[in-house]
Image (cartoon, grey):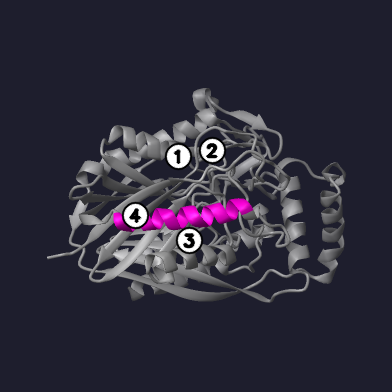
Amino acid sequence: MSDFQAGFARVNVTPPMGVSINGYFFDRFVEGVLDELEANAVALSCGGQRAVVIALDNCEIDQYTMDRFRGQIARDCGVEPAAILVHTTHTHVAPFVGQDPVDRGRHGEAEYEAYLTRQLSAAAQRAFADLKPARAGWAVGQAPGISFLRRFRMKDGSIRTNPGVGNPDIAAPIGEVDERVNVVRIVRQGGADIVIANFGVHPDTVGGSKVTADYPGFARRTLERALPHTRCVFLNGAQGDVNHVNVHARGGDFNGLELDSFDDVARGYEHAAHMGRVIAGGVLQVYTKAHFAPVEDLRFAERRVDLPSNMPTAEEMVQASRFVALHQAGRDCDIPFEGMELTTVVAESLRMQQLEHGPESFPLRLTAVAFGPIALLGIPGEPFTGIGLAVKAGSKFPMTMPCCLTNGSEGYFPMQEAYDEGGYEARSSCFRAGVAERIAEESLTLLNSL
């Protein structure tokens, strides 16, 4: 008989007023709270092994800082670091934590970081204290019409990210959208059920300076209202090249949205609620019909991958240095671009400045936790949907959940064609072309070793 057990805990991680916010290339500070930020933890135990998965409402946290969080959890809970997944949902209205992935000289606020360390460890400890006999099932739903490719080929042959709603110069989107909602249902004896939902799309739906969990928070709350005595955890998937923007919006598609001149993207709190409801609907489509299978063991592993860095040439540094100087002087208006094109050249220039003198490669750590037929894959950055599709197709597990920004945030992982064609993600990425294909390959090696 299986001795599989699962536990759940939730802690509040909402910051005080005035804390620096991550997510864009200009300073923002917390001016209010639209909804509370949370860390949701699921503890797992089977066959003498233990693991914990934590979903944190935050934009991104680098590997170095994540290692410190995981080390504290490992010491406090008596689990191996490789058995700990700390995932950030990628809301763009949450505190800046750790080191900036582009500007390594910029750091988050130490006081909030210390608080977050304690809260993450508390969530893990409480989840382990909540362990109860359980069984696990899985299913796949659909969440149509809320995830859209954000890279486009324009009629003049150029490539643009977020070219704007209704832009007449758009020729066609580039890539493939994955509208599947991966669902894990854990039924426990004497405790609330746990549902883990996995869907990939950027949570940059709200903007502004009032903190919010964005659509992941709405998805959790909607499901918990619809399913009494159930706790929901949301894990964002492969989302590096998809967001909420429908550039061909018609009729009521634009309800709840207003154009943000910062990057030509329409945003709105009401639309975040809509996205959360659609994802919750994808879970509810299949929740009752989840396929349950025995969980006889719990496995976890970590795999290091060294990837070449995207170092600039001396010629490229001339213009990059000029753009960085203008940006840091608050003179973006003197850089000859607007909207998302301005964001692209600023991000590209900062990447070049960062990598002018190396390093020549970066170490990444992929992490996986598997129980029965279910596997969760932690990727420490923002993978394009092509990575998620390849991992799902090649994994030997019936249910595989690729999770972005897990145990690290080291930048974008664009597909080869994005480097060939251009666009924000490839131009700002710290990694050379081939990074996405390598991550997909190494991820499958890791998963299939389990």
Q: Nearer the viewer, mark 4 or mark 2?
A: 4
- For marks 3 and 4 on the same chain, the one whose residue lies earlier in the sequence: 4
The image quadrant of residue 74 is bottom left
CA gap, disc 1 and disc 4:
19 Å
Q: Secondary structure at mark 1?
A: helix
| Position in image of residue 221 (x %, y %) | 39, 36
Q: Is residue 63 magenta?
A: no
Report which residue position mark 1 lands on: 217
Work out how far the residue at label 3 is from the one at label 2, CA to CA, in angstroms.
Answer: 28 Å
Please state the total of marks drawn on the protein image.
Answer: 4
Q: Which residues are magenta?
A: 111-129
Disc 2 marks a residue whose amino acid type is Thr
The residue carrying mark 2 is 212
Q: Assess disc 3: are there few (<14), some (14-19) or many (≥20) residues with their C-alpha within 10 Å of its C-alpha.
A: many
CB within 8 Å, label 4 to label 2: no
Give the camera-side residue of 428 and 377. 377
Between the residue at mark 4 and the residue at mark 2, the CA separation in whole angstroms equals 24 Å
